[in-house]
Amino acid sequence: MSFTLHGLGVSKGIAIGKVHIIRHDQIEVSEYTLSKHNLEEEVSRFEKALAIARQQLLQIRDKAPKDTAVDIAAIIEAHLLMLDDSLLTRAPIELIHQHQCNAEWALKLQCESLVQIFDKMEDPYLSARKSDVEQVVMRIQRILRGYAETALEPENMANMIILADDLSPADTVLMQHHGILAFITEYGGMTSHTAILARSLGIPAIVGLRRARAYIQSDDILVVDGFQGMILAEPDERSLRYYRMRQREEKRQRAALNKLKNSPTMTRDGTPITLHVNIEFPEDVTAVKRVGGEGIGLYRTEFLFMNRQQPPDEEEHFEAYSRVVRALKGGSVTIRTLDLGADKPIDSRFYDGSVGANPALGLRAIRLCLKNQKLFKPQLRAILRASALGQVRMMIPMVCSFQELVQVHNLMEEIRDELRNKSIKFNSQMPFGVMVEVPAMAICSDLIASYVDFLSIGTNDLIQYTLAIDRGNDAVNYLYDPLHPAVLRLIKMSIDAAVKVDKPISMCGEMASDSRYVRLLLGLGLRYFSVNPEAFLEVKQIINNSDMKGLSQRTNEILQTSSPTEITERLEAINA
């Protein structure tokens, strides 16, 4: 009998095939008390397990295919780094001594403590990293209990749909490129490594299908709908015909989108639009080229600071930036200075003091950088040096006052003098811009625009701060609304202020990557978009199929509307 289950679709597409179930048996951990003279022996047993775990991961890394997705390879490296982190090395040993308990129990206590911290994080990417901690802990516990490592046989998974509770990076490295049709997991989120791998390989995936393994058996026939986040088990012939038709249509649409790679981005009536790509890692340049992107509108640099105890030095910054600039071969690269301190916490050793009880409104982004210039100056020097290699622009996040701009300008001038004195090349005319992501900046954009070379609207924070809601809080995140009149008016206000003084203004927030809002943003006057690689061709298609005639008037009518229902109806009319 057919039935459906719903989860979170993290990679679009339709797949039809048999199920292959992977089981990671949970280990039952018991506590037992040790005598004091046995504690050092227990510590030694724990340290030996750490060494074996490290050796296992090194072997998996070494066996990985050369074309392993960079994100997955990075997660393997992150797991290796966790095995060197004091939170998983020293803390359990302290617990063994403190509780006179066995290593498995100490590790369980420490894991629960870390998971609680991750659960409180607002950023979905960081929150999803708790599964990495759990997987590393499970690996160590399996070694402590004497279990052999699970041997996957990926070559037997060709043309199968994989169902698991969750997939470790080690699993995904071993099974990638083996003709798997789709992934389904009971846990995970939009940024879990299952999701990352699926998007990287371009195959459908659904996560968060709780208890799916209780209802589905190996070799069951499934339809996976990554668009709707739904699976259909044991479909009847009529349903199969429908989804096979959907597969053919999807294939046709994908082929049509790929034809746009080399075409200009321009509306039907000839309005040229600049469409760039957002990236997080230097390796993401591959995705930029895959979709035909010519420039990077947002290069996030936080990755350089994550999973480490010491901040990167100037050379590490420069190496990362220069790789991207050289790979773009003349394309524009907008480097955003580090945006840490709120939903992307860093080691407290990176700065003095506390982030405060409400980090989203506290010491984050440019505020943190100006307070701790030892953290900031190496990055500024590296960006200036990279500017000698190509079209580099520098963008400052979360600016809310003119004084902050002056401080950054003064720092830049100081660093330029240092580089000149050392005869180090840089572009003295490197464009300098700010993000519009707090209401104060949007409201004062007419006062600020003259003092910068460009602006870029960050909608994720702008919406959160405008509506005074914590988008990571389940109790209020339903209020997070890109179509709220206040948000739309602030966007319009910012665009108009930039246009008035002839300064380019782009949007690099998630709203620009959402196909529903592309024509609305065109109507508001936006001419520069920067979107994630997955959305690039779809956004380009919408732009190329849009006609600017009448669009401005219709979006102005939305600006005069307060009813959410009416706004939605008018938006649907624009997109029709």
Image (cartoon, grey):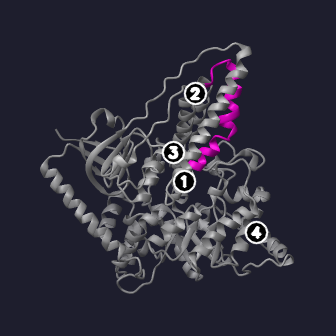
Tell me if label 3 and label 2 are in contact, CB under 8 Å: no
The furthest residue to the left? 238
Q: Quickly name the residue at label 2.
A: 144
Would residue 469 be seen by someone viewing this image from the given angle? Answer: no
Residue 216 left/right relative to 488:
left
Give, as a three-letter code, the residue at label 2: Leu
Q: Is residue 337 above or below residue 64?
A: below
Give the mark nearer the N terminus: 3 vs 2. Answer: 3
Task: Please report the residue visible at 48 percent of the width from the left and 67 percent of the height from the top.
Answer: 287
Residue 507 left/right relative to 381:
left
Q: Whole-percent x and y of residue 203?
A: 36, 56
Q: What kind of element bears circle 1?
A: helix
Q: CA distance from mark 3 to mark 4?
A: 33 Å
Q: Quickly name the residue at label 1.
A: 73
Q: What kind of element bears circle 2?
A: helix
Q: Quickly name the residue at label 3.
A: 128
Q: Quickly name the residue at label 4.
A: 381
Q: What span is in magenta? A: 76-103
The label on residue 482 is: none
Tell me if label 2 and label 1 are in contact, CB under 8 Å: no
Give, as a three-letter code, the residue at label 1: Ala
Q: How many marks?
A: 4
Give, as a three-letter code, the residue at label 4: Arg
Give the mark nearer the N terminus: 3 vs 4. Answer: 3
